[in-house]
Amino acid sequence: QEGIENVRVFSKNGLVMYSSQVREIGTALTKQDSACTVCHGTSVPLDTLSLSQRARFEKGTGQKHVLSIITPIPNEPSCSTAPCHAHSPKERKLGLLEVSTSLVRIDQEIRRNIINTVLFDLALFLFITAFIIGYILFFVNRPIKRLLQGTLEIGSKGPRTYIPLRTEDEIGSLARAFNEMSDRIDAYTQDLEKIAEERTDDFRKSEEKYRLIFQESQNGILLTNPSGRLLDINLAGIKLLGLHSGKGAPEAGNVSSLFINQSDWASVRDQISLSGSVRDFETQLQVREASTIEALISGNIIKDSHSQIIGYVLQIKDITEQKEAERALVKGKKTIEGILEGSPMATFVVDRSHRVIHWNKACELLTGKKTGELIGTNNQWQAFYAEPRPILADGILEEDYPLLKRLYGDKGLKESSIIPGAYQAEDFFPSLGQGGREIFFLAAPIRDPEGHIQAAITTIQDVTEQRRAERVIRRNIQEIERAYEELKATQEQLIQSARLASLGKLAATIAHEINNPIAGVLNYIKLLIKIFSKGPVGPERLEELRGFLAIMEKETARCGEIVKNLLSFSRPSVVRKEPAPMNDIIEQALSILTHKIEISGVTLIRQLGPDLPPVTCDFKQIQQALMNIIVNGVEAMTRGGALTIASRFLPKEKMVEVEIRDSGVGIPREDLDNLFEPFFSTKAEGKGVGLGLSVSYG
């Protein structure tokens, strides 16, 4: 109809159901829009409105003034009861009717009326006298022109001219009314422009916000029509589906082609259509050139102003890695269960609620309790005790270490040195097997990634035979220790016998060693007696006599040292290990054997290493071992030869090595195995008892 700018019908939810401007159909208004703030501008929406409240001035297209009037559409009884309507009689309002009327004709009428009035007045004034015409020209025409100018300025954006008030007559009243109307229209226009700018800015920001959310979402978001044809898609969806453009319709076609199982798409579509949405529908999609992903589909319905389905918004979340991780977790769980089940070590697991969740075959064989009897129960005590009581795993679950100490303190309870938080104990169970079983327990906590205990795993081991063997071994060790003490006493007797035998064999040598210095001393004594028998000795011979006495002192000391070494060598002693210089032990042994070596025609070669570290040993035993080996070597060289004794430090082994080598006839191969046997000797009868090398070896 002419003069009607626009007619719009809104639903009570703000959805444009009808509009003269087709592009507005299906759009939705918020409570902040100018058409809605009339009722919803207060905390409680207004139920009835006056005409002035329902009318508002706006600027239309082409800067034309528009008068918009909204009229609530009541839910008449004839509507709520009609078969074509589905509204409840309790709903008082069904929507709004907004009619926007152009004020152009009114503006034009005002102008025409003013012009006609002016022309009429002018004709009247011309009819009257020139004076009246002049008066009118001065007092009426000029204000009227200003009113006309002001009227024209109302529709412009330039600065307005106020009509001066020079008279108090009708023209002055008209000018005053005009000025007031102009002020109100200008203020209202400014308010409308400000509101329009704010609404436009809010709409732009809102659109940018939701577009940003749409594009930056980590999940794929698709917009489709009711048949499933792709209308729009965000960046995540492009990447997920392997597309190359933001508009997916030309490339992806219908989203139903993405579903490997077409019945899944039908289910998604049906759920959205019936309930308005679908949440976390799990399916498989074919994307990226025949690649397959597992996805969660969520979606909502999109309806137009007539509540007709015009499309769907779908959200696709790729859960391929999550599902693979879940499958790997299940596989790992089954693998662990298989390992535990097939383990020869009896193992069971108790969860946080103290229920048995695993009881392997080895546990069945050891305790006689079947898996089916205990799984899902907290009766694990039945496998070990006659009455209900906590076991080691229960204390681990509760981290109740005083309880563990009270129950297993006398059962060898101790914390594991390998597994943190694990404890072990051992107990005897008379009800297990024939005659009872000694069982070793090791219980360890199973923690989640945050460190909280979720279960406890216990391994049990039958150590009955092991403990019996240990008791037998302890008895055997005691018997061995007794035998060792007896053998040690026998060895000491052999060592002492070997010493005495060595002394017997060296008797002539020792007698010669002592006889020579004593004979020298005796000769010097006789010489001194002879000198003193001739009279007093003069000062000139004192130096000579001091030399005689010094030789006598030296030879006497030599005899004393030989006797001292012999007494020390022959005296029984307790083994005493202490640091001793190896070269000193060698030299002391050689000091006793020097004469025997010389009279046997054997050349002694010393190759003793310097700066040898002390050796922790029994001085006398090492000395005897060296003497036995040296004597054995000297006696093997019946026609003389060379005896080499060397000492050296071995840094790598951190040991001192003593090597004794002779040039004798050697040892027959068949005698090598018996070489260190006690009383074994290859010498002629009466030449040796066969203890020297045996004692040295031991």
Image (spheres, rainbow, N blue to C red):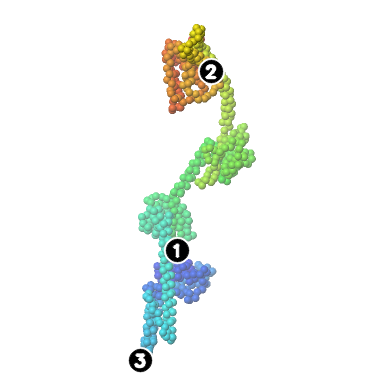
Of the two numbered discs 2 and 3 on the same chain, state the one appearing first in sequence.
3
Q: Is residue 132 visible?
A: yes
Helix, strand or loop under label 2: helix
Q: Residue at x 48, y 18 (%)?
A: 588
For residue 437, above or below residue 150: above
Of the two numbered discs 3 and 1 on the same chain, state the one appearing first in sequence.
3
Three-letter residue code for mark 2: Ser
Helix, strand or loop under label 1: strand
For residue 564, above or below residue 289: above
- Mark 2 vs 3: CB contact within 8 A: no
Crowding near the residue tagged with mark 2, few <14, some 14–19, many ≥20 C-alpha atoms within 10 Å: few
Q: Nearer the viewer, residue 116 or 629?
A: 629
Q: Nearer the viewer, residue 464 or 281?
A: 464
Q: Nearer the viewer, residue 498 or 305?
A: 498
Q: Residue at x 51, y 41 (%)?
A: 337
Helix, strand or loop under label 3: helix
Count of numbered labels shown in the rendering: 3
For residue 680, above or below residue 654: above
- The quadrant of the image that shows the N terminus is bottom left
Three-letter residue code for mark 1: Lys
Q: Position of residue 247 (x, y in %)?
A: 37, 58
Q: Position of residue 627 (x, y in %)?
A: 49, 17
Q: Position of residue 480 (x, y in %)?
A: 57, 23
Of the two numbered discs 1 and 2 on the same chain, state the one appearing first in sequence.
1
Q: Which residue is mark 1?
A: 303
Crowding near the residue tagged with mark 3, few <14, some 14–19, many ≥20 C-alpha atoms within 10 Å: few
Q: Which mark is residue 568?
A: 2
For residue 94, above or below residue 668: below
Q: Which residue is mark 3?
A: 130
Alpha-carbon distance for marks 2 and 3? 175 Å
